[in-house]
Image: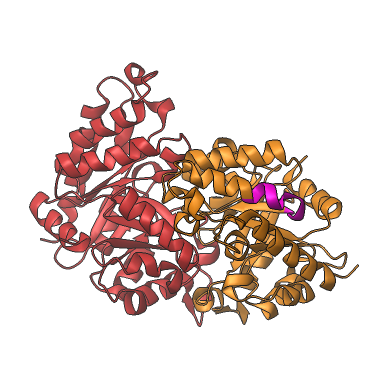
Chain colours: A orange, B red
Amino acid sequence: MGFMQQLRQRWTDADTLVCVGLDPEPAKFPAHLQGDPDAVFAFCRAIVDATADLACAFKPQIAHFAALGAEDALQRLIAHIHDAHPGVPVILDAKRGDIGSTAGHYAREAFDRYGADAVTVNPYMGRDSAEPFLARADRGVVVLCRTSNPGAGELQDLEVDGIPLYQQVAARVATQWNANGNCLLVVGATWPRQLAEVRAIVGDMPFLVPGVGAQGGDAADVVRHAATADGTGLLVSSSRAILYASQGEDFAEAARAAATGLRDLINRHRPR
Amino acid sequence: MGFMQQLRQRWTDADTLVCVGLDPEPAKFPAHLQGDPDAVFAFCRAIVDATADLACAFKPQIAHFAALGAEDALQRLIAHIHDAHPGVPVILDAKRGDIGSTAGHYAREAFDRYGADAVTVNPYMGRDSAEPFLARADRGVVVLCRTSNPGAGELQDLEVDGIPLYQQVAARVATQWNANGNCLLVVGATWPRQLAEVRAIVGDMPFLVPGVGAQGGDAADVVRHAATADGTGLLVSSSRAILYASQGEDFAEAARAAATGLRDLINRHRPR
């Protein structure tokens, strides 16, 4: 089953739009994991096992592993998700982008080495730079559109023929990049108006929506502005607010409570 | 000594504008290295040692290592360059870009884990996403401007108030991102007109210029259109044409000959 089909199945079966972001920061791990040489894997696995039934996807952020030299932990973590929680897809958040021959190596890194079901990519270099990802029809390609950071607008809001660049990107992805039907867009929860504008451009294309929680985005607003008519179309991603809900021994239970709260908040606002 | 000072020193001392790209592809390694479990490191080290006196910088491309799970080889390779060839800076070609908190992890990956002297970054998310790189005043930040791939223009040529996006990026980097004087731009050798246009916007800011050789860019054209008045300002990067000049046992000698040819071609066209 391809990524897109798996995602739609998961939305239905698990009745959740929550994407749990896996951004390990050892300094924030509970005391009993400090000093454990395999703490990154142990922490993330505990979070995964505590939240899997609440998640429509997991999203490990690769820089958090790479800065620690923890590629092996990332590889085992993705394998663990696939083994222990079949049906929950994994989006590798890597924001890759390079000329085609090099992009092929990045695609192999994400899809073959790590076994990710989808990957985030940066559109600045153009469609040919994303082609090795797009060509993998069974995998998802999540293209940056309007990102959640405060300075997102510096380039993304520049107007081309009266239309901001992020909308130009959305339209191009929908009409020119999506021949295999495997594209999604990143639109930040911090920009509700832009969420609605992009939704109007791209129909039912799924959005990966970071920025709720620590970054200040409002999950209810996201659903109101960007859910599709059937009440799906969204992966509302939360990382820090779930992972570090408690820094004590109860971190996994606290993560579960935070993910449950987010799922329920979102579900209350979904059209049914 | 910071990256920018080291680069200028190197241009003068070694009289070369050639940047040797390190893009290992084991299928193209000579037969005697096939089967060597440490072939990636052995191949790249041989190239480095054969070309260091001809290079103003080395540029390992991280996807080529990551797709193979060869992070350890990349780490040892950069350490080897610093140990054996002091004065030759290392640019990690990673094209990173993410929200600030995550970009901090990418900066630690590039500068602390790998010890790179500079890194390539993608501007799409805006200046705040590059801040953790820009803040490292002793390291170089090489921002994508007009990339070498055939489809570069899809977004980069979109006109904002009559000025194409890549020129908007160039102007912003020069006036707003470069407070620490540690910015460079990527402009592809495949676009001579655009090289000249960007040069006119950013003064003496150095350009990393990929795309000569396998991608079809002309090194003499690059120098004519984009060298600074003192005959520097360029890192003309070549990877495949040097690395795989021969796929036989003489690969290192052939790489040296190719790098020598490129250096001499460039030097014949430099203003002196």
Q: Quadrant of residue A251?
A: bottom right
Where B192 sits versus B72, above or below?
below
Q: Picture coordinates of residue A252 (x, y %)?
A: 64, 54
- Image quadrant containing the N terminus of chain B: bottom left
Q: Quadrant of residue A122?
A: bottom right
Residue placed most toward the observer, A43 or A115: A43
Q: Is residue B47 left or right of residue B119?
A: left
Magenta region, residue range: A47-56
Q: Residue at x 65, y 49 (%)?
A: A48
Q: Residue at x 76, y 43 (%)?
A: A87
Residue placed most toward the observer, A220 or A43: A43
Q: Picture coordinates of residue A96 (x, y %)?
A: 51, 53
Q: Is residue B125 left or right of residue B88?
A: right
Q: Quadrant of residue B169?
A: bottom left
Residue placed most toward the observer, B128 or B212: B128
Q: Is residue B156 left or right of residue B171?
A: right
